[in-house]
Amino acid sequence: MPKSIAYIRWNYPTELDYYNSSSNTLGADLRVPIINTLLRMGYGVNIHSKMTPRDETLIQTGIGEGFDYSRFKAVGYHPGEPVTDDMVIVEAAAPFTPASIKGVPYMKYVADALRGYRGTVIWYQHGGFDGRPSVIWESGAYEPNLSPSNIKNLFHDMGIRKEQVVIWTHVTDRRTFVQKWPIFKGMVIMATPIGFDPEIEPQMPYNASAKYDFIYIGVNKGNRQRKLMDFLYGLPFSVLVVGNKWTPGTVDNITFVGEVKGHGKIYDLYKQARFALIVGDDQFEETGNQTTRFTQSINAGCITFGDARFKGVERVVGRDMLVSSRMELLNKVANLRNPEVVLRAQQRNLPTWETVLARLLPELERVK
């Protein structure tokens, strides 16, 4: 088993403030509980990518909003320094962009940290499908005719073999995942469910007196809007929809509030509803790509229904909570008995991050 694990964010700042980290760039609601769990399990954790000043202060003081961060004072911080840990997790960010801080690309810190590394590199693909990870193992010589900040030059002469890289994902259909993203063909793919950390997202009781009947949280992209409206528009339910690219306002029974900044603030919104619905764009549904909507809605006390077209969603919500139409959804809500029992069954379906990592890390060791 590894004793020390490096954690690297791909092309955005590495944020550890659960309540205030950007929800647009994704990941904090996974990154924070994973790192907290690794620390609780006794692993050393070192961050070699660049953090924001706010998050640098957090690991120095162990103080942050809404959560006891004292354990995070044990996190090492070595931006751009060569990784010497037993294993490194490189977390994809969505969308892909050459973001920078004070003119220095965030990815330069990543490249400098990984260049020449000989251990296991875990590419953690939890979001969209545009992370461009292949530069890690397909890098070539420096190209003087390109900008020094060009991704090819940032990742020149990495010396990392493709065989060192393991893909970690939360899809339930690996074959379709590789078809959608053929750069991963022939690679080792570890697919696990999303976990939760009870210190950060404790399992709450059913929200019987909640303000809204239904809630949906997620970016308005692809054909999610059509799918969501097909299920919820015009039903005798009050619905709250939250997320980037939704136009604030009210349409019939649905209230759209647009973007809410901060992952923790988003999590708290689930507590304002009795039920949640999981839909996804075609890529997510076809691959069965789990997101934190699966765990957060249930842990926050929402009985959660899933679009029957979403592969693998029944493993979380249960077969009885799959729906294919608005009338089926309406009938299942009307006939729901013992909601507390239904919620507790869904909560039992969720593994903790400690359970997930205790199984995953030994498997990764055997891949080396």
Image (cartoon, rainbow, N blue to C red):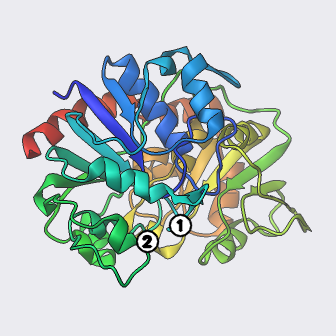
Task: Give the label on residue 130, or none.
Answer: 2
Q: Are marks 1 and 2 in contact (CB under 8 Å)?
A: yes
Return the x and y of residue 133 as percentages of the image width and height.
33, 65
The image quadrant where one finds the N terminus is top left
Which residue is painted at 74% across and 48% down in the image?
261
Q: Quarter of the image holding residue 100?
A: bottom right
* Residue 106 seen in the figure: yes
Specify whether 360 is left or right of 249: left
Q: Amino acid at mark 2?
A: Asp
| Left or right of 172 in this view: 65 | right
Q: Crowding at label 2, few (<14), some or many (≥20) Cα neighbours within 10 Å?
A: some
Element under disc 1: loop
Image x and y of residue 220, in percent: 68, 69
Residue 89 percent location from the top left of the image: 32, 44
Give how far apart the Cα atoms at labels 1 and 2 are: 7 Å
The C terminus sits in image quarter: top left
Numbered label tally: 2
The image position of residue 291, as x and y in percent, is 50, 52
- Element marked by disc 2: loop
| Residue denoted by label 1 | 95
Q: Of label 1 and label 2, which has the lower sequence position?
A: 1
Residue 75 against residue 120 in the figure, above or below: above
Residue in the picture at 73% in, 51% down: 215
| Mark 1 residue type | Pro
